Structure formats: structure tokens, C-alpha cells
Image (spheres, helix red, strand yellow):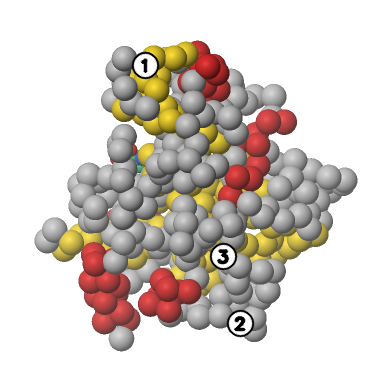
Amino acid sequence: MKFQLASLISVLAATVSAHSWLECVDTDVSNLEAAKANPALDVQQTCKGFPRNKVSNGDWIQESKTYLWDLNNNAMNPDGLACRPSQTNTYPAGVPMTTAKPGQTLRLRHWGNGHSRYDMGSPLHRDPGVVRLYHAGKKETEIRSKSELNENNWVKGAQSNFSADAVIEVVGNKMNEKGNYFDWTIPSSLENGRHMFVWVWAWDMAVTSNPANFNPGTDYNNALMNSWTTCFDILIEGSSATGSTNTGSTVQPSSPVASSAPANNICASKTCLKGGMAAYTCTGSDCPACWYAAGDKYNCFDYKDGKCPFGGAYDCKKNLQTRGATRFERTPFE
Ligand SMILES: *[C@@H]1O[C@H](CO)[C@@H](O)[C@H](O)[C@H]1NC(C)=O
């Protein structure tokens, strides 16, 4: 049965469009090193703390349809919400919330779904991207809008390559991703109580870029745009922190140059071609709001019906990376 499900998953992963979601917040894997060394082994894992409202837990097919959240899909998410509306702070019997202490390392597990390798899977030659976490900075506080999934609310350091820590069995030219993990240590600044988090897979390419001295281990990755989310809570116990806390990167003195800088720099100083026309250049804030990378140049367009006309724009008026182009839209400048 296990084997059949795994085969079915590989088949589906090859045919449906890309997606992933967080399966478990606190995963206990008893043979991770052995399974990495020998991916033919069954991974022995149990889940001790779950994401929100996992009513169909264990049913991969059902969750592919009713649990994942495609952040930039306008048809699915017209209001730009950070969480799927069914992912409220609800934990049915058998799929409890995570309880943990500051300083404890949690092993989060997400689905690879055929996207773990650049040289294999679907689509081919696409960077697997990163997974990362966001937190509003205090307990009992929701992140509601996808625009809040920004560097200010990023949990400093909580960012890892989508497949850096995975058990992947390769048979012929097919891969079976048996577990994709993301280890994260709970910061000591979190006080006792329930804390809401958003897990994100950032997979779409953003218009912004990373600074030259970008360190993937410690810096926020601006070059990737958030694509898929799952929301969860942790009940923090045994903390000595008091009052409101802030896990965000902006309060950390060690944080290097704010990495929203590349976008700000684009908006303030770069030249773009109005309407994509070579004869009409403008610079910085004299230009239309919606910027699109085009090779080493930028094209910029005015709003249409109050929005950037194509997916994947950097909106210089709002200073925000907007939604990605959907599969059926023109993707003019990728
Ligand atoms: C993730 O790791 C893969 C394999 O090492 C690499 O090709 C890819 O560029 C990495 N992506 C990011 C965003 O770090």
C-alpha cells in the first residue's frame, strides 16, 4: 500500500502543476542519516505537531486539492491572503498543534513533489528555491495578507534550500522524494503562548536580486518570490522571554544591509523603457509604477484598472513584488 501510494504520487507529481505544502511541523525521523545514505530504505517517521486544520491528514490527493495554498493564483486567492481560509487556528483530534520550548530544534517536513532537483523532475532546469518562515513578532497575532510575508516578518535565519535536507531515491531518471526536511531552532525571544507562523515555499523568480555579498545561510533571499504557503501555530512553553517579542530580521543588529535594498535601488535609480519602448527612457520615480526585468534592462508600465498589467511586476509605488504570472497569462519579461 505504501509503495502504491508512493508510485501514484510520482505519477501525479509529474502531471499536475507544481505545488508543495507543509506536512508536519515537528517530525521525528529515527533513521534520517541511514536513509540519506541509502535512499532505498523506508524512512521511519512520525509527526508530533501538525499544521493548521489538517482534516485530511495522510490523504495526499485530497490535500493536493483542498489544503495547499497557491499564493499568486488570482483565481484561488483574489484577496491576497497569506493562509488558505480553511487553515484557521483549529486542530482536529489526532492532528494536534506543536508544543515546544525556545531553543528546541523542530524538523519541518514538506512535500518534494518532483521539484527537488534542477537536473530532474518537473519542470526540468528550475531552481528548487527555498522554504522559509514568517511570524508577526508577537503571540496571538495573525499574519493575514500575503504582503506581510516580507523581510520584516521573516524569522531571521529561518530559510533553507527546498531540497537541501531530503531523502531522494532515484530510479532510472525518476526520483521519489521520500522526505524533504527543514530544521529550525525556535528563537529564545518567543514568550509563552500561541505563536502563529507561515511556512512558505519561495519558488518563483522575483524581479529583485540579491546583493553581491548575499549569504544564503543568513540573508533574506530577495531573488525568489513566495509561491506556496501553509499556516501553523506553536504553543510555546518554558520560555523566560516576556512582553512582545520580535523574531524579525530588522531588529537583529547583525543583519546586513536590508535586502529590500535592491528593489529600492531599482525604483530610485535605474533607467527603464516606458511601455517597453526603446525610444522612451525614464529614470527612477519619474517612471510608471510597474517594473519588469528584461535581460539587463527594465521595462515599465502604468497601472491598468489599478493594477500592474502583467504578472511578475515589481510595483515601485507600493514597493512590493506583485503576483507572478499564472500559467495562462502572458509572461512578457522572464
Ligand atoms: C538549492 O540547492 C540546489 C542543489 O544544490 C542548487 O542547484 C540550487 O541553486 C539551490 N537553490 C537555492 C535558492 O539556494
Which badge, 3 or 1, comes first in the chain's sequence? 3
Query: Mark 1 is on which residue type?
Result: Tyr
- Residue under label 1, please give it: 280
Residue in the image at 39% along x and 23% along y: 274
- Vertical order, 325 against 316 (above or below): below
- Vertical order, 78 against 263 (above or below): below
Residue 18 locus on image (x, y percent) = 34, 59
Q: Nearer the viewer, residue 18 or 26?
A: 18
Secondary structure under badge 2?
A: loop
Residue in the image at 39% along x and 31% along y: 292
- Vertical order, 10 against 270 (above or below): below
Mark 2 packing: few (<14 Cα in 10 Å), some, or many (20+)? Answer: few
Secondary structure under badge 3?
A: loop
Tell whether label 2 touches label 3 (CB within 8 Å): no
Residue 234 image-quadrant placement: bottom right
Residue 198 locus on image (x, y percent) = 60, 54
Q: CA distance from mark 3 to mark 2?
A: 21 Å
Query: Mark 2 is on which residue type?
Result: Gly
User: For disc 2, does the CB lie below 8 Å from ligand 1?
Assistant: no
Tell whether label 1 touches label 3 (CB within 8 Å): no
| Camera sees residue 182 | no
- Residue under label 3, please give it: 84
- Residue under label 2, please give it: 94
Q: Quadrant of ligand 1?
A: top left
Residue at the left extreme of this rendering: 172
